[in-house]
Image: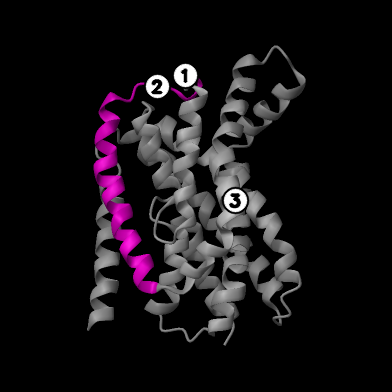
Amino acid sequence: MGISIFQTIIFAIIQGISELFPISSVGHGVLTPYVFHWNLSPTFLKEHFLPYVVMLHLGTALALLVFFRKEWIRLIASIFDGTKKESRRLLLLVIVGTIPAGLIGLIFEKKFNQLFSNVTSAAIFLILNGVLLFYGERMQSRGRKEIGQLKFRQAFIVGLFQSLALIPGLSRSGASMTAGFWVGLKHEASARFAMLLATPIIAGASILELPKLAKSGAPGLLEKSLLGGLLAGVFAYISVWLLMRWFKKNEINAMRPFAYYCWLVGILVIVSKVI
């Protein structure tokens, strides 16, 4: 069977929360049908699931644009105002950081699609995501930089890590923030840069997938995807608000609760598959 409105609502809530929290929204998208015992057709999972999930991401991108609207207004204004050198440099850092995930996504999209129906793979990578968060944060102790102090090659490295999110179970925000720690960013600065990098990638992917949904031929799929995107946007806005407050108040071990969560969910799924 395809996806119902009720299932779309569940997906949207999970998407909105898990996309910005460093716990892999795509991984949760793969695990959700398994956990709730939804009998989704193999055709939907292989052909329509990725465009469907990406459209939910569109709501996330809009939430990020609204939350960081003042920042994006300054970045865009710097294109036309040569005196805004700091904002223009930040814009260039975002562009450089966006390039790796954009290229890798376009080149390897079909190969990554094959992982979107593999529950065991998603659970394993979710556990690995927890490892990345737990041990990666130890590098944060040297983090003293603000975003504007990054070098362009460091922004590229953070963007390269963002591309790990193409694998279900690995988190976009988690990988980006961890890489941010490694290049010396503070907690809050690393989280903010991760969110700025995510916005154009998520929005771009959504725009590319929209024609696929329109031509899918699946009854009501586009409408359900748009509804899901709207709901996901609401929960994403709440999530990014909570996340930024969390990282502002917690400069030590802020990633550990998310690492524990990833380990718990991944292990429970694998155990359930074995049993």
Residue 121: x percent and y percent? 36, 68
Would you name the residue on which mark 2 appears?
145
Residue assigned mark 1: 149
The structure residue drawn at horizontal position 48% and vertical position 25%, both measured from the top left corner, is 147
Residue 192 in sight: no
Q: Quadrant of the C terminus?
A: bottom left
**Quarter-of-image position of residue 79:** top right
Could you say which quadrant of the image residue 51 lies in? bottom right
The answer to whether marks 2 and 1 mark residues whose Cβ atoms lie closer than 8 Å is: yes
Closer to us: 216 or 60: 216
Kind of residue indicated by mark 2: Lys
Instruction: Determine the CA span between mark 2 and mark 1.
Output: 6 Å
Tell me if 217 is positioned left or right of 130 in this view: right
Amino acid carrying mark 1 in the image: Gln
The residue stretch that appears in magenta:
119-148
Expressed as whole percent of the image width and height from the top left, the position of residue 158 reads: 45, 36
Q: Where residue 202 is drawn, which disc sits there?
A: 3
Q: Position of residue 261 (x, y in %)?
A: 28, 58
For residue 252, which numbered disc appears in the image? none
* Residue 81 occupies quadrant: top right
